[in-house]
Image (spheres, rainbow, N blue to C red):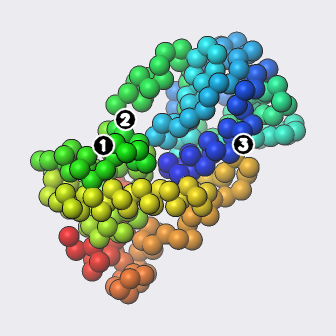
Amino acid sequence: MPELPEVETTLQGIAPHLMGQTIIDVVVRHHTLRWPIPANLKNLLHGNIVKNLQRRAKYILIETDTGTLILHLGMSGRVRILSEPATAGKHDHVDILFSNQMCLRFTDTRRFGALLWTTDDPFKHSLLEKIGPEPLSTEFNGKYLWHHARRRKASVKSFIMDSRTVAGVGNIYAAEALFQSCIRPQKQAGKVSLEQYEKLATAIKLTLKNAIAKGGTTLKDFMKSDGTPGYFSIELQVYGRQGQPCIRCDTTLKSTRIGQRSTVYCPSCQKV
């Protein structure tokens, strides 16, 4: 699943082509995604000017004159900018055409993504209103994590992957940040100290910033907006490396399951 850096990379890739442009046509080939695409999306968007684009957690918000298009990539979704017509494939569900002759094409093999419309404040939409702070914001820090973890029995990995705790820290980057801060992912969130949470918050920020700078993580289904893959996967230190030696101490990395997700960690470096 594309995580926060992949979504941010996508946003940065499409924004220069869409800002200030007028929507001149919308082609919806399949209305059935995770939730149905509005049947009248073409009429809703036609003639609107793109006023702003931003990311909230793993959602891309395309703000126009009359409302906001809420885009989620789901498990395998991606968007591309096309500068000239291209034959649509089986999984190319939506094309949005702009006055500069660019086309935003939404592709989703598993149809678990979403393309929704709201005329209200998008941050108060039912999908976004309970999401925690952005991990790269000043609001997110070790003290915040420590305060919200009090008496929490869930694992610290599950805690930081909960979108109500913090926006968009998925499986890959949670594992990497916990390794960098030397915290065992199975440890109860309520038993992690303030000092450890300060290290963890810093590690989350650095990991995400690095991934964004590198273009996201290379996943089987993820491509950037220009059709090329991200390149952060060459720097992953624990994710996907179970059975291999730790880059710090040569101890064999172990794998366990937390919240139905595979988790790789170093039993020597991540003792606390």
**Residue at left offset 46%, top offset 40%:** 57
Question: Is residue 153 rendered to the left or right of residue 165?
Answer: left
Task: Pick the residue in front: 28 or 153.
Answer: 153
* N-term-proximal mark, 1 vs 3: 3
* N-term-proximal mark, 2 vs 1: 2
Q: Position of residue 152 (x, y in %)?
A: 16, 48
Q: Nearer the viewer, mark 2 or mark 3?
A: 2
Task: Provide the residue designation for mark 2.
Answer: 131
Per the model, the C-alpha gap separating discs 1 and 3 is 31 Å
Task: Pick the residue in front: 28 or 81.
Answer: 81
SS at badge 1: loop
Question: Is residue 266 rendered to the left or right of residue 230?
Answer: left
Task: Provide the residue designation for mark 3.
Answer: 80
Q: Is residue 5 visible?
A: yes
SS at badge 2: loop
Q: Position of residue 160 (x, y in %)?
A: 32, 51
Give the image quarter of residue 83. top right
Q: Position of residue 128 (x, y in %)?
A: 42, 30
Q: Amino acid at mark 3?
A: Arg
Q: Amino acid at mark 2?
A: Ile
Q: Nearer the viewer, mark 1 or mark 3?
A: 1
**Residue at left offset 66%, top offset 52%:** 223
**Residue at left offset 87%, top offset 36%:** 85
**Residue at left offset 30%, top offset 62%:** 199
Mark 3, Cα crowd under 10 Å, few <14 / some 14-19 / many 20+, is many
